[in-house]
Image (cartoon, grey):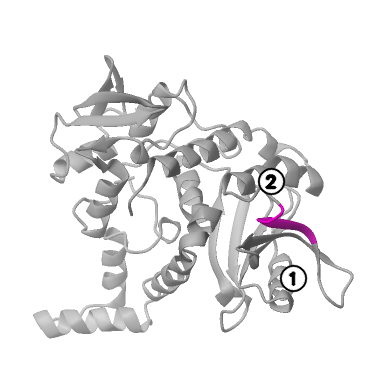
């Protein structure tokens, strides 16, 4: 995936909103206040700000009910958003109601959120409600959770949907995740057969599942936590600023990229923010920026943005290639061991 400076800036706005909202996640906000303080800002960041992009309180034909938001692309409704109070635990009944609304209105996508948790359903999917759910992300968790939330939510950004329909990526990910996490799936059976055909060896399904986990072929939510990930932050608190703290000897993600041969140990990293170019040098798996060492690209980027939360992976480049692209290339090729994040 190729990232642009514009995408990086929008992501920075999203992260800044999450940081500002840290205390709000713990408050007993009403549904109306949840929409104003937690849902509306995210939709605005994603590009839904005008009457041509979004309708509110959309009536459901033949009923006295309303859906909170309808997201439009070129005047056509593409997704419904139903908001709940921040302390409301989203239920299957909530999701089922939104999916029913979508069926009546002829809209394919449904999003249910309490501002902290965002669930995405595909109304046209065959089968029960559980089969229609394609993603769930948390914006009130640690750095990794917030990064995954942005990856998913950015797919419904107005600019993205005007060019393609990236939400179909979620459908593929859901099927791949399901197929590669069940011991009796056709995919796992095919992999066991491939091992038998190639090596003349019978292997149990569990061995295949463990190999899939180690290869990071399924989303992190379905894989047990692995060592080497950056420290997280408690749910409902702002993202940490500045250099992260790691245990002595614990390798950083950058060091893993170095070990994988994707970065030289003394790589010169570059970025451009607000029209100003910056350079930093890699040293012992950390970023040396103006004489200060930062454990992660995000910490170094935040230092350039006056402490504002930033995803440095889509800001810093090495020889013109974003670190995020290097990381994705490494992950897809299984070039590095688990712990790259």
Extreme residue toward the right, this view? 64
Mark 2 surroundings: few (<14), some (14-19) or many (≥20) residues within 10 A: some
Can residue 24 be seen in the rendering of this structure? yes
Can residue 245 be seen in the rendering of this structure? no
**Image point 28% across, 42% down: which residue?**
323
Q: Which residue is mark 2?
A: 40
Residue numbers of the magenta segment:
51-57
Q: Which residue is mark 1?
A: 97
x and y percentages locating residue 276 in the rendered image: 35, 24
Task: Determine whether, in the image, residue 225 is placed left or right of residue 193.
Answer: right
Under circle 2, the secondary element is helix
**Image point 46% across, 52% down: which residue?**
151
**Image point 35% across, 42% down: which residue?**
229
Looking at the image, which is closer to me, 35 or 160?
Answer: 160
x and y percentages locating residue 95 in the rendered image: 68, 67
Image quadrant where residue 301 sits: top left
Mark 1 surroundings: few (<14), some (14-19) or many (≥20) residues within 10 A: some
Above-or-below relation of 272 to 69:
above
Task: Determine whether, in the image, residue 122 is placed left or right of residue 9.
Answer: right
Looking at the image, which is closer to me, 267 or 159?
Answer: 159
């Amino acid at each position: 995936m190729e990232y642009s400076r514009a995408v990086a800036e929008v992501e920075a706005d999203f992260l800044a909103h999450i940081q500002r909202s840290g205390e709000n996640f713990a408050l007993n906000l009403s549904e109306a206040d949840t929409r104003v303080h937690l849902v509306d800002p995210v939709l605005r960041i994603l590009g839904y700000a005008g009457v041509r992009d979004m309708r509110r309180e959309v009536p459901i034909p033949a009923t006295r009910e309303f859906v909170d938001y309808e997201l439009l692309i070129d005047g056509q409704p593409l997704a419904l958003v139903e908001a709940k109070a921040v302390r409301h635990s989203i239920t299957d009944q909530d999701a089922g109601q939104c999916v029913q609304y979508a069926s009546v209105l002829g809209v394919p996508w449904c999003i249910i959120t309490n501002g902290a948790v965002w669930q995405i359903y595909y109304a046209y999917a065959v089968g029960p409600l559980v089969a229609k759910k394609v993603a769930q992300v948390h914006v009130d968790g640690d750095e990794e959770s917030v990064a995954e939330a942005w990856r998913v939510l950015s797919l419904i950004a107005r600019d993205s949907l005007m060019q393609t329909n990236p939400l179909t990526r979620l459908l593929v990910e859901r099927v791949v995740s399901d197929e590669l996490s069940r011991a009796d799936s056709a995919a796992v059976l095919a992999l066991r057969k491939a091992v038998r055909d190639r090596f003349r060896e019978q292997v149990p399904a569990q061995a295949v599942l463990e190999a899939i986990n180690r290869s990071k072929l399924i989303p992190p939510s379905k894989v047990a936590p692995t060592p080497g990930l950056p420290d997280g932050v408690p749910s409902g608190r702002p993202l940490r600023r500045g250099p992260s703290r790691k245990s002595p000897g614990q390798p950083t993600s950058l060091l893993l990229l170095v070990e994988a041969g994707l970065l030289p140990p003394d790589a010169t990293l570059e970025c451009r923010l607000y029209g100003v170019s910056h350079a930093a040098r890699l040293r012992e798996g950390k970023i040396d920026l103006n004489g200060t060492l930062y454990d992660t690209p995000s910490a170094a980027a935040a230092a350039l943005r006056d402490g504002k939360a930033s995803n440095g992976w889509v800001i810093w480049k090495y020889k013109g290639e974003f670190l995020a692209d290097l990381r994705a290339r490494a992950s897809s090729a299984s070039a590095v061991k688990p712990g790259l994040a």
